Image (cartoon, grey):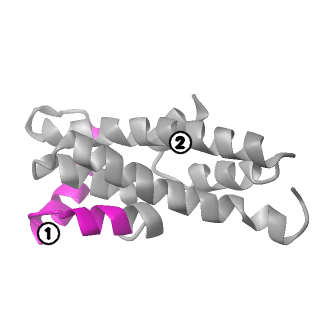
Amino acid sequence: MVGLLTGLAPVGTAEATALAVGALPSWPIRAATLGVFTVGHIIGKMLWFWAGTCESRVTWPWLRRGLDRARAVATAHPTVGTTMIFTSAVASLPPFQLMATAAGMVGTRWFAFFLIALAGRLIRFSAIASVPALFGLS
């Protein structure tokens, strides 16, 4: 559930959660928790992807503003290729929420987006979760 909520939020709560997961006591618990969290996070991003697919029908002002920003990304990169999705998933540049929405706008296949996003975010969150071990906190 936390993963889903962080996938919907356009701020860095996912990274803070991944950092907290890194402080869990045993490696198997950390790995399982991080895996479940990442899947939930990507499901949350899939909702942004879906919003991009039905952009023309969205009228809520707060969502419309986000879609307009994503439209600017989609216009600048009309093919939103898998490399760009993966790079955004790992580095958050451009912001991954915008990338998820733009990918939906340009017709990226949902399953390809899901798998690429999952791989990229798993790498990102694993790197962040490893930080507590550097300081002997896990």
Q: Label 1 vs label 2: CA separation?
A: 26 Å
On the image, the x and y values in percent for residue 114 come to 32, 44
Residue that label 1 marks: 77
Q: Main secondary structure of the magenta part?
A: helix
Quadrant housing residue 19: bottom right
Q: Quadrant of the C terminus?
A: bottom right
> Is the C-beta separation of discs 1 and 2 under 8 Å?
no
Q: Identify the amino acid type marked 2.
A: Thr
**24 sits left or right of 74 in the view:** right
On the image, the x and y values in percent for residue 1 come to 57, 28
> For the residue labelled by badge 1, is the local secondary structure a helix, a strand or a loop?
loop
Q: Is residue 40 above or below residue 136?
A: above
Question: Magenta stretch containing residue 27, yes or no?
Answer: no
Which residues make up the magenta segment? 61-87
Which residue sits at x=66%, y=52%?
18
Residue that label 2 marks: 6
In the image shown, does 4 or 135 lie closer to the viewer?
Answer: 135
On the image, the x and y values in percent for residue 132 come to 81, 63
In the image shown, does 45 or 26 lie closer to the viewer?
Answer: 26
**44 sits left or right of 122 in the view:** left
On the image, the x and y values in percent for residue 68 come to 20, 53
Q: Is residue 135 above or below residue 53?
A: below
Looking at the image, the residue that sits furthest to the top is 1
